[in-house]
Image (cartoon, rainbow, N blue to C red):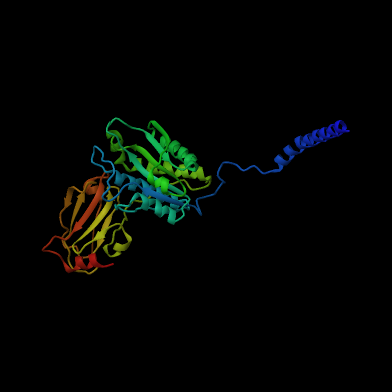
Amino acid sequence: MTIILARNLAKKAVVVFTMLVLIVPIMMAAIPVTSAKAATRKNFKGIKIAVDPGHGGKDGGALAPNRLTEKFINLSVSKYLAAYLKKAGAKVVMTRKTDKFVSLPGRAAIANRHKVHRFVSVHQNSAANRKANGTETYYYHPSSARLARYVQRFLLKYSKLPNRGVRQRSLAVIRRSNMKGVLTEASFISNPKEAAKMKKGYYRKRQALAIFNALKKELGVKDAPKPKPPKPLAPAKLKVHAGGKVSMQNTKTSVHIPYATGADNLISITNISGELAKPKVIFNDALGKQIAELEPFLRAKTIFSFYPKNLVGEDFIGSIDIIEPMGTISPGFIAALMAE
C-alpha cells in the first residue's frame, strides 16, 4: 500500500513539474520588460539640472602657467552650459553665478534643496608635471556611472585629449548630493598648451557642449534644439542703477565687475542724475593684478561705454573696476552708484 501511494505521488509531482515548465515561460512573456535606457523625451522640460562651477572667491583652484585661475574657467564653462540647458527647456540651478566662495557641503545642499534631477560639478585638472594632460570624469553613487560614461565620451569627442578614464571616488560634492551626479576634470590647466586653449571662448564652449550632449543622451532627450553659442556672459549693457540684477558690487565711489571677458560686446554705465562724471576703467587679471587702465571719460553726463576687446583683447578674463577718482567725485556718479 505504501509503495503504491508513493508511486502515485511521484506521478503527480512529474505532472506538476511538467505544467510549470510549460506555463512559466508563457507567464514571463506576458510580463512587460523594463528597458535600462531612459525614457524618450522631446526636450528638457520638467528637468532640473544643478550646475556647479568649481572653486570661487577665496578658493581660486589651480593656477595655470599663463596665470589663469581655475575658478574663472569653471564659471565660464558653467555659464555656457546653463545657457544651452535653458534654451533646451531645462530649469537650471547654479551653485554660484559670480566669483564667490561656496563650501563643498553648501554646493550639495543647494542641489538637494532644489530637488534637482542631475548634478554636474565643473572642474579643470592640475598636476606638478606640466606635461600631464587628458580628460577624466568622476562619480560616487553607482547609479551615476552611466551618466559619467556619457560625459567622458562626449568630452573626449570634443577635446580630442587622451582618455584618463571614468573613476568612482568619494568626492564631497557628488557624495553629499542625493541625485545622479558627476564631477568633470575636462583638461589640465597646469599644461601650458591646454591652458592657452582655455583662454579661447570656443574651447570653453566645447566643454559645455560636451556636457550638454551627455545629459541629453543620458536623459533620452531626442528633439532638443541644437545649441548655438550663447550671448556674452556679462550683460551687454551694464546699467549701474540695475545693480541688483547684474554681476557687480557697488561702493560709493566705484563699481566692481568680478567676472568679465574680452568677448563681452559692450559694457555701458548709465549716469542717472545728469550731473557730470569722469570715471576711469581698470582691468585686472584673474589674480586681481592691474593690467590696463582707461583714461577718465570726458564730461560723461549720461552714458559712457566701452568694448573690452578693443582695450585688452578677446583673450581677457578677469575683473573690471570703474572708479570715479577721489577729489573729482561728482554728485551724478554717486547717485548712479547708490541707486538700486
Write the residue at 42% across / 53% down.
111
- On the rendered structure, is 273 left or right of 214? left
User: Where is residue 176 shown, x and y percent of the image?
Assistant: 41, 48
From the viewer's side, name the closer residue of 314 and 42: 42
Write the residue at 40% across / 51% down.
108
User: Where is residue 195 shown, x and y percent of the image?
Assistant: 29, 37
User: Where is residue 194 shown, x and y percent of the image?
Assistant: 31, 35
- On the rendered structure, is 254 left or right of 89? left
From the viewer's side, name the closer residue of 236 and 13: 13
Q: Is residue 228 visible?
A: no
- On the rendered structure, is 76 left or right of 325? right
In the rendered image, the residue lying farthest to the front is 2
In the rendered image, the residue lying farthest to the left is 327
Which quarter of the figure has residue 31? top right
In the rendered view, would you say 83 is above or below 126?
below
Q: Is residue 43 visible?
A: yes
In the rendered view, would you say 249 is above or below 159?
below
In the rendered view, would you say 332 is above or below 158?
below
Count of numbered tags: 0
From the viewer's side, name the closer residue of 140 and 235: 140
Q: Quadrant of the C terminus?
A: bottom left
In the rendered view, would you say 285 is above or below 325?
above
From the viewer's side, name the closer residue of 288 and 266: 288
Which quarter of the figure has residue 148? top left
- On the rendered structure, is 334 left or right of 237? left
Q: Quadrant of the N terminus?
A: top right
Write the residue at 67% across / 44% down.
32
